[in-house]
Image (cartoon, rainbow, N blue to C red):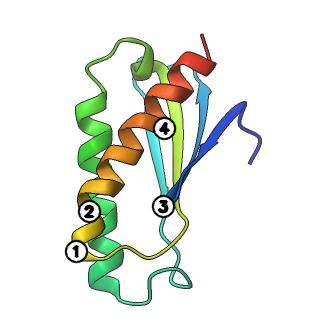
Amino acid sequence: MRFQCKASGDFLQIYAKPNDLTCSRLGLIVAKKVERRAVWRNRAKRLLRETFRRNQQNEKSRKMDWVIRLRRPITKHDSLRLITEAKLLMLQLQKCLD
């Protein structure tokens, strides 16, 4: 992945790059190797999509391409930590690309 900036946390690795479009794009990587059960993979994707959607209120994040990769399995209790980490890493990457 030839993205300009990346940030890593306990659960996620996020890549970001500005684009020339009017909207941003999101790519999710939740590998079967990391999360075996399809139910949990889909849950992680839903949580990340919703976090991404809520983050789009910022004008700078609207013109960027994002790729989010899950690094380790999550449990039901880790959902809030996953959302918080995604928000912090996305904010960190927005500052990186300014």
Residue underneath mark 1: 76
Tell me, yes or no, if residue 20 can be seen here: no
Give the amino acid at mark 3: Phe
Q: Residue at x 58, y 22 (%)?
A: 19
Which disc, if any, is residue 79?
Answer: 2
Residue underneath mark 3: 11
Q: Position of residue 11 (x, y in %)?
A: 48, 61
Instruction: Give above or below for 47 relative to 20.
Output: below
Q: Residue at x 23, y 47 (%)?
A: 50
- 83 vs 21, nearest the viewer: 83
Q: Secondary structure at mark 1?
A: helix
Residue underneath mark 4: 89
Q: Position of residue 82 (x, y in %)?
A: 35, 56
Give the amino acid at mark 4: Leu
- Of the numbered discs 4 and 1, the one sitting upstream in the chain is 1
Q: Residues within 10 Å of mark 2 (few under 14, many from 20)?
A: some
Instruction: Give above or below for 28 relative to 43.
Output: above
Q: Residue at x 44, y 89 (%)?
A: 36
Q: Position of residue 92 (x, y in %)?
A: 52, 27
Res 2 → quadrant: top right
Question: How far separated are the C-alphas under marks 4 and 3?
Answer: 11 Å
- 69 vs 26, nearest the viewer: 69
Labelled pair 2, 1 in contact (Cβ < 8 Å): yes
Q: Secondary structure at mark 3?
A: loop
- Of the numbered discs 4 and 3, the one sitting upstream in the chain is 3
Question: How far separated are the C-alphas under marks 3 and 1?
Answer: 13 Å
Question: How far separated are the C-alphas under marks 2 and 4?
Answer: 15 Å
